[in-house]
Amino acid sequence: MSFDFDAVVVGAGAVGLACGRSLAARGLSVLVLEKEPHIGQGVSSRNSEVIHGGLYYPTGSLKARFCVQGRRQLYAFLDSHKVDYRRCGKLVVATDEAEVPRIEAIFEQATANEVENLEHLTGAQVRALEPGLNAHAAILSPESGVFDSHGYMLALQGEIEDAGGSVVISTPFERAEPLPGGGFAVTAGGEGGATLTARLLVTAPGLAAQDVAGRIAGYPVERIPAGHFGKGVYFRLTGKAPFERLIYPPPIPGALGTHYRKDLGGQAVFGPDLEYVGGEDYSVDPAKAAEFEHYIRRFWPGLPQGALTPDYAGVRPKLHGPGEPQPDFQLHGRDVHGVDGLLALFGIESPGLTSSLAIGEAAAEGLVHD
Protein backbone atom coordinates (compact mmCIF):
# COMPACT_ATOMS: atom_id res chain seq x y z
CA MET A 1 0.00 0.00 0.00
CA SER A 2 1.07 3.62 -0.43
CA PHE A 3 1.56 5.94 2.55
CA ASP A 4 1.30 9.70 2.96
CA PHE A 5 4.80 9.68 4.49
CA ASP A 6 7.54 7.13 4.90
CA ALA A 7 8.12 8.25 8.50
CA VAL A 8 6.43 10.39 11.14
CA VAL A 9 8.50 11.66 14.08
CA VAL A 10 6.73 12.91 17.22
CA GLY A 11 8.61 15.80 18.85
CA ALA A 12 10.71 18.58 17.30
CA GLY A 13 13.33 18.87 20.02
CA ALA A 14 16.98 18.14 19.29
CA VAL A 15 16.52 14.35 19.34
CA GLY A 16 13.32 14.26 17.28
CA LEU A 17 14.83 16.58 14.68
CA ALA A 18 18.03 14.51 14.57
CA CYS A 19 15.92 11.39 13.97
CA GLY A 20 14.03 13.18 11.21
CA ARG A 21 17.30 14.34 9.64
CA SER A 22 18.78 10.83 9.60
CA LEU A 23 15.63 9.34 8.07
CA ALA A 24 15.39 12.12 5.46
CA ALA A 25 19.08 11.63 4.59
CA ARG A 26 18.21 8.05 3.62
CA GLY A 27 15.73 9.31 1.05
CA LEU A 28 12.58 8.88 3.13
CA SER A 29 9.72 11.36 3.14
CA VAL A 30 9.56 12.65 6.74
CA LEU A 31 7.00 14.58 8.77
CA VAL A 32 7.99 15.87 12.24
CA LEU A 33 5.08 16.80 14.52
CA GLU A 34 5.52 19.40 17.29
CA LYS A 35 2.76 20.41 19.71
CA GLU A 36 4.38 23.74 20.68
CA PRO A 37 4.35 26.86 18.48
CA HIS A 38 8.14 26.64 17.96
CA ILE A 39 10.70 23.86 17.69
CA GLY A 40 12.78 22.92 20.72
CA GLN A 41 10.48 24.51 23.30
CA GLY A 42 10.79 21.73 25.88
CA VAL A 43 13.78 19.88 27.33
CA SER A 44 16.00 21.00 24.42
CA SER A 45 15.73 24.70 25.28
CA ARG A 46 15.88 24.48 29.08
CA ASN A 47 19.29 22.99 29.76
CA SER A 48 22.92 24.01 30.07
CA GLU A 49 23.76 23.90 26.33
CA VAL A 50 26.84 21.92 27.30
CA ILE A 51 28.61 19.63 24.85
CA HIS A 52 29.52 16.71 27.11
CA GLY A 53 32.73 14.74 26.69
CA GLY A 54 31.24 11.39 27.79
CA LEU A 55 33.11 11.03 31.07
CA TYR A 56 30.60 9.64 33.51
CA TYR A 57 28.52 6.92 31.88
CA PRO A 58 28.99 3.15 32.25
CA THR A 59 31.20 1.80 29.46
CA GLY A 60 29.14 0.18 26.73
CA SER A 61 25.93 1.92 27.77
CA LEU A 62 23.92 3.85 25.20
CA LYS A 63 24.71 7.05 27.09
CA ALA A 64 28.47 6.43 26.87
CA ARG A 65 28.42 5.34 23.22
CA PHE A 66 26.02 7.97 21.95
CA CYS A 67 27.62 10.79 23.95
CA VAL A 68 31.14 10.19 22.61
CA GLN A 69 29.98 9.47 19.06
CA GLY A 70 27.41 12.29 19.10
CA ARG A 71 29.91 14.82 20.47
CA ARG A 72 32.41 14.04 17.70
CA GLN A 73 29.68 14.39 15.07
CA LEU A 74 28.28 17.53 16.71
CA TYR A 75 31.42 19.67 16.41
CA ALA A 76 31.69 18.79 12.70
CA PHE A 77 27.98 19.57 12.20
CA LEU A 78 28.26 22.92 13.99
CA ASP A 79 31.29 23.85 11.89
CA SER A 80 29.60 22.92 8.61
CA HIS A 81 26.43 24.87 9.49
CA LYS A 82 28.27 27.83 11.07
CA VAL A 83 26.45 27.39 14.38
CA ASP A 84 28.16 29.16 17.29
CA TYR A 85 30.04 27.12 19.89
CA ARG A 86 33.06 27.35 22.20
CA ARG A 87 35.19 24.29 22.90
CA CYS A 88 36.21 25.68 26.29
CA GLY A 89 37.01 22.43 28.10
CA LYS A 90 35.75 21.15 31.43
CA LEU A 91 37.41 20.85 34.84
CA VAL A 92 36.03 18.18 37.17
CA VAL A 93 37.26 19.46 40.50
CA ALA A 94 38.07 17.81 43.81
CA THR A 95 37.79 20.63 46.33
CA ASP A 96 39.53 18.58 49.03
CA GLU A 97 41.53 15.38 49.36
CA ALA A 98 38.44 13.34 50.26
CA GLU A 99 37.00 13.96 46.76
CA VAL A 100 40.13 12.82 44.89
CA PRO A 101 39.09 9.13 44.70
CA ARG A 102 35.78 10.21 43.14
CA ILE A 103 37.41 12.20 40.35
CA GLU A 104 39.97 9.40 39.85
CA ALA A 105 37.07 7.00 39.27
CA ILE A 106 35.64 9.45 36.71
CA PHE A 107 39.02 9.57 34.93
CA GLU A 108 39.10 5.78 34.70
CA GLN A 109 35.51 5.67 33.47
CA ALA A 110 36.18 8.35 30.85
CA THR A 111 39.31 6.57 29.65
CA ALA A 112 37.34 3.33 29.26
CA ASN A 113 34.76 5.32 27.27
CA GLU A 114 37.52 6.47 24.87
CA VAL A 115 37.19 10.16 25.76
CA GLU A 116 40.17 11.91 24.18
CA ASN A 117 42.93 14.12 25.61
CA LEU A 118 42.11 13.80 29.32
CA GLU A 119 44.62 15.23 31.81
CA HIS A 120 45.24 14.96 35.54
CA LEU A 121 45.94 18.35 37.10
CA THR A 122 47.33 19.28 40.50
CA GLY A 123 45.75 22.08 42.51
CA ALA A 124 48.55 24.41 41.44
CA GLN A 125 48.05 23.56 37.77
CA VAL A 126 44.31 24.21 38.10
CA ARG A 127 44.89 27.60 39.72
CA ALA A 128 47.33 28.50 36.94
CA LEU A 129 44.50 27.89 34.45
CA GLU A 130 41.68 29.34 36.54
CA PRO A 131 42.86 31.68 39.32
CA GLY A 132 40.30 31.85 42.09
CA LEU A 133 39.19 28.22 41.76
CA ASN A 134 39.47 26.11 44.92
CA ALA A 135 40.87 22.77 43.75
CA HIS A 136 42.93 20.12 45.50
CA ALA A 137 43.14 18.33 42.12
CA ALA A 138 41.13 18.14 38.90
CA ILE A 139 40.55 16.34 35.62
CA LEU A 140 40.67 18.41 32.44
CA SER A 141 38.46 17.32 29.55
CA PRO A 142 39.35 19.66 26.66
CA GLU A 143 36.68 18.18 24.36
CA SER A 144 33.76 19.64 26.37
CA GLY A 145 32.14 22.91 25.37
CA VAL A 146 29.01 25.07 25.08
CA PHE A 147 26.95 25.80 21.98
CA ASP A 148 23.89 27.51 20.52
CA SER A 149 21.34 24.72 20.83
CA HIS A 150 18.61 26.67 19.07
CA GLY A 151 20.86 27.44 16.11
CA TYR A 152 21.67 23.73 16.03
CA MET A 153 17.99 22.75 15.94
CA LEU A 154 17.27 25.27 13.18
CA ALA A 155 20.08 23.68 11.16
CA LEU A 156 18.56 20.21 11.70
CA GLN A 157 15.17 21.52 10.60
CA GLY A 158 16.82 23.03 7.53
CA GLU A 159 18.35 19.68 6.55
CA ILE A 160 14.98 17.92 6.91
CA GLU A 161 13.27 20.54 4.75
CA ASP A 162 16.09 20.57 2.18
CA ALA A 163 15.53 16.82 1.80
CA GLY A 164 11.82 17.40 1.11
CA GLY A 165 10.55 16.72 4.64
CA SER A 166 8.31 18.89 6.81
CA VAL A 167 8.40 20.10 10.41
CA VAL A 168 4.88 21.06 11.51
CA ILE A 169 4.43 23.16 14.66
CA SER A 170 1.32 23.62 16.85
CA THR A 171 0.27 20.11 15.85
CA PRO A 172 -0.01 17.77 18.84
CA PHE A 173 0.10 14.01 18.35
CA GLU A 174 -3.25 12.51 19.30
CA ARG A 175 -2.98 8.78 18.62
CA ALA A 176 -1.63 6.12 16.29
CA GLU A 177 -3.01 2.80 15.19
CA PRO A 178 -1.03 0.06 13.43
CA LEU A 179 -2.55 -0.83 10.05
CA PRO A 180 -3.27 -4.46 9.09
CA GLY A 181 -0.71 -4.54 6.30
CA GLY A 182 1.96 -2.60 8.21
CA GLY A 183 2.43 1.08 8.89
CA PHE A 184 0.32 3.43 11.00
CA ALA A 185 -2.67 5.70 10.89
CA VAL A 186 -1.53 8.77 12.81
CA THR A 187 -3.95 11.41 14.06
CA ALA A 188 -2.55 14.82 14.95
CA GLY A 189 -3.62 18.42 15.31
CA GLY A 190 -5.91 18.59 18.30
CA GLU A 191 -9.51 19.71 17.74
CA GLY A 192 -10.52 18.75 14.20
CA GLY A 193 -7.14 17.10 13.65
CA ALA A 194 -6.23 15.16 10.54
CA THR A 195 -5.33 11.49 10.12
CA LEU A 196 -2.47 10.48 7.85
CA THR A 197 -0.59 7.28 7.17
CA ALA A 198 3.08 6.47 7.61
CA ARG A 199 5.20 3.37 7.20
CA LEU A 200 7.42 4.18 10.21
CA LEU A 201 6.81 5.98 13.50
CA VAL A 202 9.40 7.45 15.89
CA THR A 203 8.36 8.98 19.21
CA ALA A 204 10.82 11.43 20.78
CA PRO A 205 8.59 13.81 22.76
CA GLY A 206 10.77 14.20 25.85
CA LEU A 207 8.61 14.68 28.93
CA ALA A 208 5.54 13.32 27.10
CA ALA A 209 7.17 10.00 26.12
CA GLN A 210 5.00 7.86 28.39
CA ASP A 211 1.80 9.68 27.44
CA VAL A 212 2.53 9.35 23.71
CA ALA A 213 3.35 5.63 23.99
CA GLY A 214 0.04 5.15 25.81
CA ARG A 215 -1.77 6.63 22.78
CA ILE A 216 -0.38 4.03 20.36
CA ALA A 217 -2.85 1.16 19.94
CA GLY A 218 -1.24 -2.18 20.72
CA TYR A 219 1.66 -0.78 22.72
CA PRO A 220 1.79 -3.02 25.82
CA VAL A 221 1.19 -0.80 28.86
CA GLU A 222 3.50 -2.90 31.02
CA ARG A 223 6.36 -2.09 28.62
CA ILE A 224 6.07 1.67 29.15
CA PRO A 225 8.68 2.61 31.77
CA ALA A 226 7.58 4.77 34.69
CA GLY A 227 8.56 8.40 34.22
CA HIS A 228 9.61 11.05 36.74
CA PHE A 229 10.04 14.81 36.37
CA GLY A 230 13.42 16.06 37.63
CA LYS A 231 13.41 19.85 37.93
CA GLY A 232 16.59 21.90 37.95
CA VAL A 233 16.94 25.66 38.39
CA TYR A 234 19.69 28.02 37.25
CA PHE A 235 21.07 31.24 38.69
CA ARG A 236 22.98 33.89 36.75
CA LEU A 237 25.90 35.87 38.15
CA THR A 238 25.75 39.66 38.27
CA GLY A 239 29.21 40.77 37.21
CA LYS A 240 32.16 39.37 35.28
CA ALA A 241 32.36 35.62 34.62
CA PRO A 242 35.14 34.26 36.88
CA PHE A 243 36.27 31.23 34.81
CA GLU A 244 36.72 30.37 31.13
CA ARG A 245 36.17 26.61 31.42
CA LEU A 246 33.19 24.59 32.57
CA ILE A 247 33.58 23.79 36.29
CA TYR A 248 32.00 20.60 37.63
CA PRO A 249 32.23 19.25 41.18
CA PRO A 250 31.89 15.44 41.48
CA PRO A 251 28.36 14.28 40.49
CA ILE A 252 25.48 14.04 42.94
CA PRO A 253 23.22 10.94 43.11
CA GLY A 254 21.00 10.86 40.03
CA ALA A 255 22.54 13.86 38.21
CA LEU A 256 25.79 15.67 37.42
CA GLY A 257 25.13 18.37 40.02
CA THR A 258 25.28 22.15 40.08
CA HIS A 259 28.03 23.34 37.76
CA TYR A 260 29.42 26.56 36.31
CA ARG A 261 29.47 27.68 32.71
CA LYS A 262 30.35 30.85 30.87
CA ASP A 263 27.66 31.05 28.22
CA LEU A 264 28.16 32.23 24.63
CA GLY A 265 27.15 35.73 25.71
CA GLY A 266 30.00 35.78 28.23
CA GLN A 267 27.86 35.55 31.36
CA ALA A 268 28.28 33.11 34.23
CA VAL A 269 25.46 30.66 34.93
CA PHE A 270 25.22 28.10 37.75
CA GLY A 271 22.93 25.06 37.83
CA PRO A 272 21.02 22.87 37.70
CA ASP A 273 20.12 21.39 41.05
CA LEU A 274 17.72 18.43 41.22
CA GLU A 275 14.25 18.35 42.72
CA TYR A 276 11.57 15.82 41.84
CA VAL A 277 8.28 17.50 40.94
CA GLY A 278 4.80 16.37 39.91
CA GLY A 279 4.67 18.16 36.56
CA GLU A 280 6.10 20.90 34.37
CA ASP A 281 6.95 23.66 36.83
CA TYR A 282 9.37 26.28 35.49
CA SER A 283 9.32 28.70 38.40
CA VAL A 284 12.58 29.67 40.11
CA ASP A 285 12.43 30.35 43.85
CA PRO A 286 14.77 33.30 44.59
CA ALA A 287 15.24 31.92 48.12
CA LYS A 288 17.30 29.07 46.61
CA ALA A 289 20.11 31.57 46.01
CA ALA A 290 21.43 30.99 49.55
CA GLU A 291 21.66 27.23 48.95
CA PHE A 292 23.43 27.84 45.61
CA GLU A 293 25.87 30.31 47.21
CA HIS A 294 26.84 27.78 49.88
CA TYR A 295 27.43 25.06 47.26
CA ILE A 296 29.32 27.29 44.81
CA ARG A 297 31.70 28.64 47.47
CA ARG A 298 33.14 25.14 47.84
CA PHE A 299 34.83 25.61 44.46
CA TRP A 300 34.68 29.43 44.16
CA PRO A 301 35.27 30.97 47.60
CA GLY A 302 35.30 34.45 46.04
CA LEU A 303 31.62 34.45 45.05
CA PRO A 304 30.35 37.91 46.15
CA GLN A 305 27.42 37.98 48.56
CA GLY A 306 24.09 38.53 46.81
CA ALA A 307 25.53 38.28 43.28
CA LEU A 308 23.20 35.49 42.08
CA THR A 309 19.90 36.28 40.34
CA PRO A 310 17.20 33.73 39.40
CA ASP A 311 17.49 32.76 35.74
CA TYR A 312 15.43 29.81 34.43
CA ALA A 313 14.37 26.24 35.16
CA GLY A 314 14.28 23.00 33.21
CA VAL A 315 12.52 19.68 33.76
CA ARG A 316 14.25 16.43 32.79
CA PRO A 317 12.46 13.22 31.75
CA LYS A 318 13.92 10.80 34.29
CA LEU A 319 13.33 7.05 34.45
CA HIS A 320 14.44 6.85 38.09
CA GLY A 321 12.99 8.29 41.25
CA PRO A 322 14.83 9.70 44.29
CA GLY A 323 17.49 7.34 45.58
CA GLU A 324 17.21 4.95 42.62
CA PRO A 325 20.17 4.19 40.33
CA GLN A 326 20.28 6.24 37.13
CA PRO A 327 19.28 4.04 34.18
CA ASP A 328 20.36 4.18 30.54
CA PHE A 329 18.53 5.75 27.61
CA GLN A 330 15.77 3.45 26.41
CA LEU A 331 15.09 2.99 22.69
CA HIS A 332 12.18 0.59 22.38
CA GLY A 333 11.93 -1.27 19.11
CA ARG A 334 9.88 -4.27 18.05
CA ASP A 335 11.87 -6.57 20.38
CA VAL A 336 10.42 -4.66 23.35
CA HIS A 337 6.87 -3.76 22.33
CA GLY A 338 6.11 -6.13 19.43
CA VAL A 339 4.98 -3.39 17.03
CA ASP A 340 6.63 -3.36 13.58
CA GLY A 341 8.00 -0.04 12.32
CA LEU A 342 7.86 1.73 15.69
CA LEU A 343 10.73 3.17 17.73
CA ALA A 344 9.82 4.79 21.07
CA LEU A 345 12.41 6.80 23.03
CA PHE A 346 12.28 7.16 26.82
CA GLY A 347 14.43 8.92 29.40
CA ILE A 348 16.37 11.04 26.94
CA GLU A 349 17.81 13.48 29.47
CA SER A 350 21.46 14.52 29.76
CA PRO A 351 23.55 13.81 27.69
CA GLY A 352 20.71 13.63 25.15
CA LEU A 353 21.50 16.97 23.51
CA THR A 354 25.16 16.03 22.94
CA SER A 355 24.08 12.53 21.86
CA SER A 356 21.30 13.64 19.51
CA LEU A 357 23.04 13.05 16.16
CA ALA A 358 24.12 9.57 17.27
CA ILE A 359 20.62 8.77 18.56
CA GLY A 360 19.20 9.93 15.22
CA GLU A 361 21.58 7.62 13.37
CA ALA A 362 20.70 4.67 15.61
CA ALA A 363 16.98 5.31 15.10
CA ALA A 364 17.32 5.36 11.33
CA GLU A 365 19.53 2.27 11.28
CA GLY A 366 17.10 0.39 13.48
CA LEU A 367 14.11 1.18 11.30
CA VAL A 368 15.46 1.32 7.75
CA HIS A 369 16.62 -2.00 6.37
CA ASP A 370 18.38 -1.97 3.02
Image (tube, grey):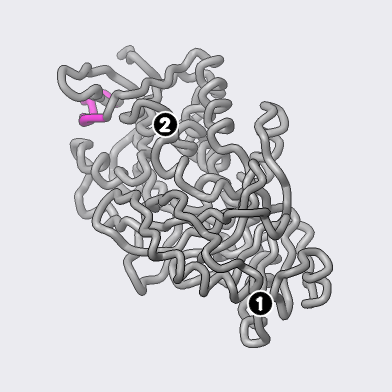
Please tell me which residue lies in front, 313 or 184. Answer: 313
Task: From the image, tell me which residue sits under label 1.
Answer: 94
Q: Left or right: 326 with respect to 176?
A: right
From the top left corner, tell me how far across and down residue 141 is, in percent. Answer: 72, 60
Q: Secondary structure at mark 2?
A: loop
Q: Left or right: 199 with respect to 131?
A: left
Whether residue 127 is situated above or below residue 206 in the rendered picture:
below
Whether residue 160 is situated above or below residue 137 in the rendered picture:
above
Task: State yes or no: residue 117 in magenta.
Answer: no
From the top left corner, tell me how far across and down residue 169 is, in percent. Answer: 36, 23
Determine contact: label 2, label 1, CB under 8 Å: no
Q: Residue furthest left?
A: 192
Looking at the image, tell me whether mark 2 or mark 1 is earlier in sequence order.
2
Q: Secondary structure at mark 1?
A: strand
Task: From the image, tell me which residue sits under label 2.
Answer: 12
Please give the name of the residue rendered at 31% of the width and 24% of the height, measured from the top-left corner.
170
Please tell me which residue lies in front, 187 or 149. Answer: 149
Amino acid carrying label 1: it is Ala
- Distance of label 2 from label 1 (alpha carbons): 38 Å
Please give the name of the residue rendered at 83% of the width and 68% of the height, measured from the top-left corner.
128
The quarter in which the N terminus is drawn is: top left
Amino acid carrying label 2: it is Ala
Please tell me which residue lies in front, 24 or 39. Answer: 39
Q: Left or right: 195 with respect to 147?
A: left
Part of the protein shown in magenta:
173-182
Badge nearest the viewer, 2 or 1: 1
Please tell me which residue lies in front, 360 or 278. Answer: 278
The reply to whether residue 262 is in sight is yes
